[in-house]
Each structure stands twice: as C-alpha cells, then as structure tokens.
Amino acid sequence: MTSLSPQLCLLERLCNAIAISGDEGEVRRIVLEETRPLADTVRVDALGNVLVAKRASKRNPLKVLLAAHMDEVGFMVVSDEGDGFYQFETVGGLDVSQLAGKAVLIGKDHIPAVIGMKPVHLASEDDLKRKLTLDSLRLDTGRKNSKVQVGDRVGFATQFRRTGNSIFSKALDDRLGVATLIELLRHAPENIDLLLAFTVQEEVGLRGAKVAAHALAPDLVIAVDSTPARDLPAHDGRENTVYNTKLGLGPAIYIVDSSTLHNPRLVKHFAATGDAEGIPYQFRQPGGGGTDAGAMHQQLAGIPALSISVPGRYAHTPIGLCRLDDWQNTLRLLHAGLSHMTPSLLKR
Ligand SMILES: [Zn+2]
C-alpha cells in the first residue's frame, strides 16, 4: 500500500498517546486529525466514539462497518494521601500481581510516577507468599504534585520501540486496529460504503461499540483488534501445541470467542481471499476474550459480524510484542477482502 515509515510513525504516535477507558481524548485527537482530510463525514458522538464514512463510487453498495477501540487498560487516581502518594483503582483487565515497580504517567500532563510497594528486603516470608492486592500498592510521584487530581487516568510509561520485524509497545491492543482503520481509509475500496467506528470504553465492556453500530446501521461489521498470542515454549521444553495464535502466522480470523459466534460467510470470504491472494492468515483457536463484535452483532435487528486481529504477546501489561509483518498482512487481507465484497456475500 504505502511506504512503511509513515505507517510506523502513525502507529508510534498512537501507541505513545495515553487513552485509558473513558478518557480517550489523546487518541481521538490523532484520529480526527488523520481522518478529516480523507473522509466524506467525520463526527464525534455523545460517548466520544469517532464515526467516519467514506461513500462508495457505485450504486447500492454494501455498508461495511469496521471498528477498532481507542481505549487501553490502565488506572484511575481515587484518593490523595499526601506527600505524593495516591491510591488507585484498575480500569479494565489487569493482573495486580504484575504491577509493582512499574513506571506510569498520570493525567493530561503525563506526570511521572512509580507503582510503589514494600521492598523485597523487608518483606516477611508471609508477605512473599501472599497474593499482592491493590490496597498494598500506591502511586508515588516522589513529592506532592498539585496537578494530580482524583479521577485522573494513569497509563503505563512504556515508549514504542521497533527492532527489525518486532514492535515492543504498550497499548498495541488496540492501536494496531486504530492505525489499520486509518490506513484502510487512505486506500478506501470504492465498491463499498466504508464506515469506521473508533470506539471508546471497549476494555470496560464494549460500551462505545454498542451505540456506534446503532448510529451507523451497517450491513455487516468487522472488529479489528489485537488478540493475545499464547505461543511461549511449554514450561517442560516440549513444543507448545495449544497456542491460540502464534506470532508470524499472519492475521487471526475468529470463528468463535466468548462474545461472538462469527458469521460463517464472512469467515469463509476472508479465508478464501487469503488463499487467492497468497496472504498468510491463521484461525484464532477458541478461548476467552472478546471484541467489539460481541456488542455490535446484537444491535438493531442483528448484524453479521467478524473479528480479525493482529496477534500480540503480553496484552494488558506495560509492554506487548507483535510482528510488523503480521500487521502488514492484516492490512493486506482486510483491503483485499473488502475490495472483493459484493451484496451477494450476505444472501441466503
Ligand atoms: Zn482490544
């Protein structure tokens, strides 16, 4: 499609922005700046979703909605304890046992802080056995900072890095999807009405997607996300044969997850597109987790839905890892699959 570096710059900007659920403004600003020159209409709804339309050049086109969520998991300041210490809550699915000692940024000014806990030197044997709980942790800014307010969102401080074919970053879930949608708009297929929803509050229950699907009333929806890859070597040294997705095998097409039974015609269409165009893809193995498709397919009178994700390791931690070529192949598969869509795709 285009040369790589502008795409990577966009992904880097999106990943380094902080957009914890319910406070997606930093990512929304980038999305608005990128989509306004390319789309026929761009609007922001009452929840903060960005809704974009690029009309087909042909008559009676399919209305295809692609959704990617702008929000990421993180924290919220809930109480000021003085001297730069703050109590906090998690926002979205996070494992509390992984949080101690992590660098974070608080609020719109990105005030640096660390998640503090009792040092290991002073921990008793009981302390070390006990499961870490949120009330034993504090945000520590080092000194009182008058700009930190109760309600401020807090994100991981990790900066985007690329080495060769690997990308290390926070929030690849789902800035990969957000960047993908912007790139598809740049090369919008002319055979469909391309509708895009950059959604809010996915990580706290697919909330933005519900109203976005309602507002745009598409013929079909595709959630574009990053799916956790569990492809580490098995602990006993044997080959891991129970991975759900694997890095390097291409975009993951979903058949089923805990929120959606994906539409078989759409699954078949994208698999056939991959086969015909020589684009690698994999089927995501059944398991937990869900995408915006879970909320969207139940709106209006029901909407056929599919999810296609870029596999990524270590989702919902300070640093995820994905492959550049998996992302590029996700873009290629989506672009080719959309370009070959006709209304007969959904006929029974
Ligand atoms: Zn996600």
Image (spheres, rainbow, N blue to C red):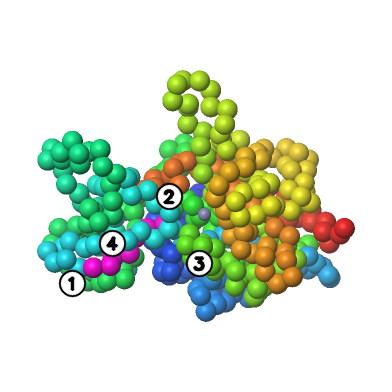
Q: Tell me which label, 1 or 3, sits earlier in the chain.
A: 1
Q: Tell me which label, 3 or 4, sits earlier in the chain.
A: 4
Q: Which mark is residue 88?
A: 4
Decide which of 77, 313 is in the foreground and name it.
Answer: 77
Q: Is residue 170 visible?
A: no
Q: Which mark is residue 316?
A: 2
Which amino acid type corresponds to the residue marked 2 in the rendered image?
A: His
Q: Tell me which label, 4 or 2, sits earlier in the chain.
A: 4
Q: Cβ of disc 4 within 8 Å of ligand 1?
A: no
Marks 3/2: CA–CA distance? 16 Å
Name the residue tied to disc 3.
200
Q: Measuring 53% from the left and 23% from the top, which residue is drawn there?
A: 239
Name the residue tied to disc 1.
146
Which mark's residue is nearer the viewer, 3 or 4? 4
Q: Quadrant of residue 68?
A: bottom right
Q: Main secondary structure of the magenta part?
A: strand
Q: Tell me which label, 4 or 1, sits earlier in the chain.
A: 4
Q: Which residues are magenta?
A: 73-79
Left or right: 148 as drawn, with respect to 236 = left
Which amino acid type corresponds to the residue marked 3 in the rendered image?
A: Val
At label 3, counting other C-alpha atoms closer than 10 Å, the crowd grade (few under 14, some 14-19, many 20 or more) is many
